[in-house]
Image (cartoon, rainbow, N blue to C red):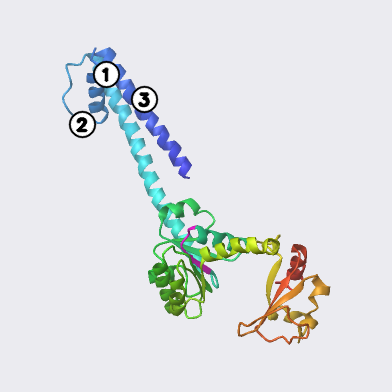
């Protein structure tokens, strides 16, 4: 639709250029005016302002002026109508777009809210896309929204404002990731989010070690320091290069490259009663190996024993090749 209006505007501009050129050349030939006087006569004629003429007009010039006025009325009327229609339609499209965005966000539940779309926020969004997890991004930089707007649900505004978080559906959200570059800004977001949703799982970025404790006291469940993680990773590549390279191969990226999966015990309930890890028998059924167990209280057990009893609301971490992980997901409808 926008392209159609633009083509009409181009036509209107071309017609205006043609009528002005015709007027200038016509007055130049018929009344022997200078180029400046011919241009002046053309402008006051097509705009119908009623200023006095440069000099006396002959019969041919008067007839030419009549036709020039009639033609310019239609052309300028067409141009004004096209521009007006374009402006009104653009406003209507913006309203419809915002209404559609609002309805899409209103339909979300258990989604993720990302505050800030810098490097960390962008990376988080890409990972969530790979896992097909619904998310909303809160960003106040309009240029970033225009650049990445396609395929991403953006809320334009400051994440420190409660109204903006409410618009992002924080009351229905399950996770909030705040990746703002300033620790103080992240602190305010964590405080606001925790007040608005007591059950929200909040993950915050931090630049300074001294900010970690403050963010956790404010209500953050996890605090991540990207610079520290990056430095540790590079140092580990020096100390244990092969082990770290192997761990980097354990991809969590998406549907066709995943090597690790987190599975809730309840996902196995439809396939019989399982009292222990041995009862699950995942190695024989899918080829996947259970490498970790997460108790309901959050305690981790690495390489758990086969006879470890399973508790409600616990989880297992499984390792396998991508095709084995897919078989696991298909078998248990995960």
Crowd around label 2: few <14 · some 14–19 · many ≥20 (10 Å): few
**Residue 29 shown left or right of residue 56 in the figure:** right
Q: Is residue 165 above or below residue 156?
A: below
Which residue does the image show at 44% across and 41% down from the upper left?
Answer: 5
Location of residue 253 in the rendering, given as x and y in whole percent from the top left corner: 65, 61
Image quarter of the C terminus: bottom right
Q: Which residue is mark 3?
A: 18
Mark 1 or 2, nearer chain start: 2
Q: CA distance from mark 3 to mark 2?
A: 20 Å
Q: CA distance from mark 1 to mark 3?
A: 18 Å
Q: Which residue is mark 2?
A: 49
State which region is magenta: 112-118
CB-based contact (under 8 Å), mark 1 and mark 3: no
In depth, the one of 73 and 150 nearer the eye is 150
Circle 3: element type: helix
CB-based contact (under 8 Å), mark 1 and mark 2: no
Occupied quadrant, residue 142 = bottom left
Mark 3 or 2, nearer chain start: 3
Q: Which residue is mark 1?
A: 63
Circle 2: element type: loop
């Amino acid at each position: 639709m926008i392209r159609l209006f633009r083509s009409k505007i181009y036509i209107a501009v071309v017609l205006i250029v043609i009528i002005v050129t015709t007027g200038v050349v016509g007055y130049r030939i018929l009344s022997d005016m200078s180029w400046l006087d011919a241009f002046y006569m053309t402008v006051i004629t097509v705009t119908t302002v009623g200023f006095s003429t440069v000099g006396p007009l002959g019969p041919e010039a008067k007839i030419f002026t009549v036709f020039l006025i009639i033609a310019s009325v239609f052309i300028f009327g067409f141009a004004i109508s096209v521009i007006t229609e374009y402006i009104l339609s653009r406003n209507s499209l913006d309203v419809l777009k915002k209404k559609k965005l609002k309805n899409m966000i209103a339909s979300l539940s258990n989604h993720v809210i990302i505050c800030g779309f810098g490097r960390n926020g962008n990376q988080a969004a890409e990972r969530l896309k790979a896992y097909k997890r619904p998310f909303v991004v809160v960003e106040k930089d309009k240029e970033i929204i225009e650049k990445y707007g396609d395929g991403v649900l953006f809320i334009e505004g400051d994440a420190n404002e409660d109204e903006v978080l409410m618009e992002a559906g924080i009351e229905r959200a399950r996770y909030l990731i705040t990746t703002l570059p300033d620790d103080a800004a992240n602190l305010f977001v964590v405080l606001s989010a925790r007040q608005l949703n007591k059950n929200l799982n909040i993950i915050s970025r931090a630049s300074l070690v001294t900010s970690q404790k403050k963010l956790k006291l404010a209500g953050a469940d996890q605090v991540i320091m990207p610079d520290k993680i990056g430095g540790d990773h590079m140092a580990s590549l020096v100390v244990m290069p092969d082990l770290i390279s192997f761990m980097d191969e354990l991809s969590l990226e998406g549907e066709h490259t995943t090597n690790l999966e987190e599975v809730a015990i309840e996902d196995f309930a439809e396939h019989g009663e399982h009292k222990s890890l041995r009862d699950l028998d995942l190695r024989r059924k899918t080829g996947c190996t259970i490498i970790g167990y997460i108790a309901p209280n959050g305690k981790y057990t690495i390489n758990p024993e086969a006879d470890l009893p399973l508790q409600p609301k616990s989880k297992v971490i499984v390792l396998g090749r991508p095709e084995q992980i897919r078989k696991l997901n298909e078998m248990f409808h995960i």
